Image (tube, rainbow, N blue to C red):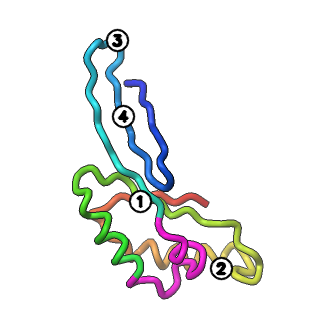
Amino acid sequence: MWPTKSKQFGNTAFLIVLPHNSHSHIIVEMLSTTFPQIITHEKALVDCDSEFEEFVKTMDIFGPKLGPMVFQFPLFDRWKFPKQESFLGVLTTFLKKLPTDHKFVIEI
């Protein structure tokens, strides 16, 4: 496996892949970004279809360089989700609606 270096710029990361034991190198750039907090924090995946579609459509301008888009969730208070099962129910329902032509990552 090749060693990799990643560099973080705000909510985006570029991945650079370097071949092992080589004087020349190949650079593979991939953009990974997090979803806006209105989707993950404020609306917590509920009634956020328009925001989700707008974000994914905007990210599509990166074409093949677009890597996984990350859902990065906060620590929710009990007033938002009284039990873990409450959040998992919302998450499961939302995941079933995700388009299959994109890559997604979930950070809880």
Residue picked out by circle 4: 16
Is disc 3 placed on a helix, strand or loop? Answer: loop
Which is nearer the N-term, disc 4 or disc 2? 4
Looking at the rendering, the stretch of residues picked out in magenta corresponds to 35-50
Is disc 2 placed on a helix, strand or loop? Answer: helix
Residues at marks 3 and 1 touching, judged by CB atoms closer than 8 Å: no
Where is residue 100 drawn, in percent x and y?
Answer: 30, 66
Q: Which amino acid, mark 3?
A: Asn
Which is nearer the N-term, disc 3 or disc 1? 3
Q: Which amino acid, mark 1?
A: Met
Mark 3 and mark 1: span between their CA atoms? 31 Å
Mark 4 and mark 2: span between their CA atoms? 39 Å
Circle on res. 14: none
Badge 1 crowding class, 10 Å Cα cut-off, few under 14, some 14 to 19, many 20 or more, is: many
Residue picked out by circle 3: 21
Left or right placement of residue 62 versus residue 50 in this view: left
Q: Which amino acid, mark 4?
A: Ile
Residue picked out by circle 2: 86
| Residue 34 drawn in magenta | no
Residues at marks 4 and 1 touching, judged by CB atoms closer than 8 Å: no
Mark 2 and mark 1: span between their CA atoms? 23 Å
Mark 3 and mark 2: span between their CA atoms? 50 Å
